[in-house]
Image (tube, rainbow, N blue to C red):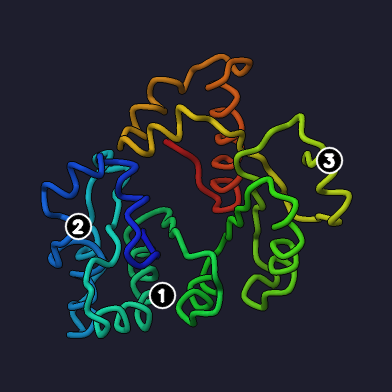
Amino acid sequence: MQGNYNSKKVEASFTAYDQLKQSGVLENSNLGVSALIRLVTSNKLTSDAIQNYAKPVLKGRLDVLYGMTSKDPDGYRDLVNNFPYITRKAAEIYDVVFVDLPKGQNEQYIKDTLADAEIVVCVTNQDEVKFEEFFDKVNTMEELKDKNKILVIADYEPKSRFNLSNIRLKYKIKDMLYAVPHNFLFADACNMGNVVDFFYRNINADPKDYNGQFILQTNEIVEKIFEMAKLRDN
């Protein structure tokens, strides 16, 4: 689920952005969250409806619910007031619901969604300037207290002096800390809407190779999420 307002990064990772624009789906209020909001406000939202308004990516395995497309401030207000309700309904029909939330935490719907979450994946880049604020928020946010948390350093360079060992030591990290190395081919795949093809092509890549190392470390996080959620891939 796309929880960011007017962001198309998640959607464009699975379908090329130009294709999305030309098809008109980004402005179609009958798709994604925009359509669900009308059902919520009319008290007609069901878990089945969420699946009906989502975009199938892998049939029977992965759907993407497009984010808010309306420029109407009233529509946005309805979204932020009801977003946690939508995620709860989605959890009734899907084994796992992933929600991409904005980085800020002041909006009440973000706090409510975090409070509902069974697992929270907190991501920051390998940037010393951001580390102190990032780990302080992780440790002090009331909504994250006693939560199952996975901390991820993105765009990771293992040869940096700010490696996982030094980060754990300096910031006294007790939660699980993972790294996802920078991979320009994956970044290109996201920009071209080819994420699924990227993983299919590289799923069996040698762990010593460039793509193999990315797949290996990404899969460690996925496996941990499934373990914590008490789920296993079939």
| x 43%, y 60%: residue | 99
Query: From the viewer's perspective, is 35 left or right of 97?
Result: left
Residue picked out by circle 2: 26
| Residue 33 lies in quadrant | bottom left
Q: Which circle marks residue 84 in the picture?
A: 1
Q: Quadrant of residue 32?
A: bottom left
Q: Quadrant of residue 69?
A: bottom left
Q: SS of the residue at dot 3?
A: helix
Q: Nearer the viewer, residue 187 or 234?
A: 187
Mark 1: which secondary structure? helix
Instruction: Give the percent coordinates (x, y) of residue 83.
Output: 37, 74
Q: Is residue 191 above or below residue 33?
A: above
Kind of residue at disc 1:
Pro
> Which is more toward the observer, 103 or 204?
103
CA gap, disc 1 to disc 2?
22 Å
Disc 3 marks which residue?
Answer: 165
- Crowdedness near tag 1: few (<14), some (14–19) or many (≥20) residues, C-alpha within 10 Å: many
Query: Badge 3 local density, few (<14 within 10 Å), some, or many (20+)?
Result: few
Q: Give residue 110's position: percent from left, percent from top.
A: 49, 74
Q: CA distance from mark 3 to mark 2?
A: 43 Å
